[in-house]
Every structure is written in structure tokens, then in C-alpha cells.
Image (cartoon, rainbow, N blue to C red):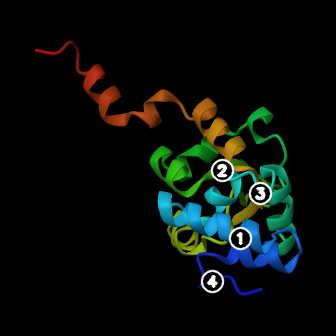
Amino acid sequence: MSQTIKSGNYILEVLRKRGILSPVSEKLILGFMKKWSVEAYRAVIETHCIEESRLADVLAEEFLLPRVARLRSRSIDVSALSYLSYADAMAFDMMPYAFDADEKLLVAIADPTQRDCVDQWIQSCGRPVTLSVAERSEIESSIQRHYPLSLQLPNTMASWSKGPCP
């Protein structure tokens, strides 16, 4: 499987190929994408054409990536969070959560079809990365739960550390 996905609708191709997506559902999803200007992943979930956990299973299988279940309940290595800013974690739907025995950074990602930004981040990360697939809702919840407030709101926290407002 090529690491670079040309089509923004690759998820739809995967679901169609696996017999999960009917022509009517596909039309519904494409209409939703156009009306709300969202990507295929979000449209598939928001239209309830497939459960988010099942979509994560399908994407993990399609891209031969490990599947991470219940990410929000896992212990997170706080030092892993320093490799991805809070803003980028939310924008890319990615969560660095641990290091493996070989010191590779373990990162959960919701949509492995969106590889351009992810590949750029991996190149700039400065350490080997192992991707796995998790549900977007689990990733977002884990980001909100585990990123310290100082990393979520760095400008606000910096100004508070200077003392009261003049």
C-alpha cells in the first residue's frame, strides 16, 4: 500500500471495496462532505454510516497498522507529549502516548489516509515513530485529558506567570 494517498476520499474507496458502503450511503456522505466542507472520515462518522470503532478496525487492517483500543484510559508517558504540540495533536487527530522497547515514539492516529501532514511531522519529529489507529473521539478525549493546561494554552499561561494584569 502506498504511503501517499492521492484521493481525499480514499476512506470511501476502502469501505466500498470491503462491501461496507452502499451507493446510497456513499451519495449521502459525499453530499454531507460538500455541504459541511468536511473530510471523508468525519462525514462517515457524522452520518452514522459506520461506527467509529469499526472504521478504526477497517483502517488499521487496510494500512497494516496496530489498533489501539480505549486510548483515553491508557497511561500516557507525559514526555511523549513534548513531540507534538497540543494544536497539532488536535489538528492532525494524533496522540503521542508512549515509547516502545526500542525507544520509538508510539502515536495513535485516527485517519491514516491523511498522510501528507503526518509524514511531514514524522520527518521533523527527530525520532523514529510507530503509528497505530484509534478512534478520533478517543484521541480527542485523550488529548484533552492528558495534555497539561500549560501546553494547551501556552500564551495564556506565560502571561499569567508574569503576574497580575496591569
The quarter of the image holding the N terminus is: bottom right
Kind of residue sitting beneath label 2: Glu
Q: Is residue 135 visible?
A: yes
Marks 2/3 in contact by CB < 8 Å: the verdict is no
Element on which disc 4 rests: loop
Residue 80 position (above or below residue 42): above
Gap in angstroms between the C-alphas marked 3 and 4: 25 Å
Q: Quadrant of residue 11?
A: bottom right
Marks 2/1 in contact by CB < 8 Å: the verdict is no
Kind of residue sitting beneath label 4: Thr
Eye-nearest disc, 1 or 4: 1
- The residue drawn where x is 86% and y is 68% is 20
Horizontal arrangement in the rendering, residue 91 relative to residue 49 (left or right): left
Tag on residue 46? 2
Q: Residue furthest left?
A: 166
Sooner in the amino-acid sequence: mark 3 or mark 4: 4
Residue topped by disc 3: 49
